[in-house]
Image: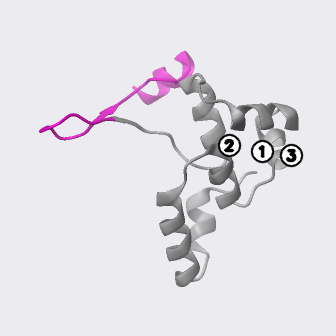
């Protein structure tokens, strides 16, 4: 059974947790995210049920389906949130995008 990212991070020493949290704010790519949770492409591929080459291609893409990105993030124990920001308004979290129909029913 996969461990949740929050559980793994909570078990770390405080100074390491702070460094990870700071670094997470600076992440720019899917590869950076994968490396931050200390997973290899092979490990991530096994969790997603795909080949390592598929993970390599995903990490190089600049455009993908939200459902693909959601699966990638969730396979590392995270959650994906899409937030729209507008001038002079509070941010709006957009829900149910990139979720499969079966997941949408569960979330609703």
Q: How crowded is mark 3: few (under 14 residues within 10 Å), some or many (20 or more)?
A: some
The location of residue 68, given as percent across then percent down, is 63, 27
* Left or right of 45, for residue 108: left
Q: Is mark 2 on a helix, strand or loop?
A: loop
Residue underneath mark 2: 75
**The one of 61 and 105 positioned closer to us in this rendering:** 61
Between disc 3 and disc 2, whose residue precedes? 3
* Left or right of 54, for residue 104: left
Q: How crowded is mark 1: few (under 14 residues within 10 Å), some or many (20 or more)?
A: some
Vertical comparison of 68 with 25: above or below:
above
Q: Do the residues labelled 3 and 1 touch (CB within 8 Å)?
A: yes
Residue underneath mark 1: 44
The location of residue 40, given as percent across then percent down, is 81, 52
Residue underneath mark 3: 42
Residue 92 is one of the magenta-drawn residues = yes
* Distance between the alpha carbons at the discs numbered 1 and 2: 7 Å
* Distance between the alpha carbons at the discs numbered 3 and 2: 12 Å
Vertical comparison of 96 with 70: above or below:
above
**The one of 62 and 41 positioned closer to us in this rendering:** 62
Q: Do the residues labelled 1 and 2 touch (CB within 8 Å)?
A: yes
Q: From this viewpoint, which residue is outermost toward the left?
A: 88
**The one of 74 and 53 positioned closer to us in this rendering:** 53
Residues in magenta, as a range: 84-108
Q: Residue at x 62, y 50 (%)?
A: 77
Q: Quadrant of the C terminus?
A: top left
The location of residue 17, given as percent across then percent down, is 54, 74
């Amino acid at each position: 059974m996969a461990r949740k990212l929050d559980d793994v991070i909570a078990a770390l020493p405080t100074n390491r947790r702070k460094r990870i949290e700071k670094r997470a704010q600076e992440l720019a790519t899917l590869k950076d995210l994968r490396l931050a949770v200390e997973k290899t492409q092979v490990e991530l591929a096994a969790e997603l049920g795909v080949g390592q080459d598929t993970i390599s291609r995903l990490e190089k893409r600049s455009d993908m389906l939200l459902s693909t990105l959601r699966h990638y993030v969730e396979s590392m124990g995270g959650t994906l949130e899409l937030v729209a920001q507008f001038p002079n308004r509070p941010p709006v979290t957009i829900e149910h995008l990139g979720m499969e129909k079966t997941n949408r029913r569960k979330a609703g």
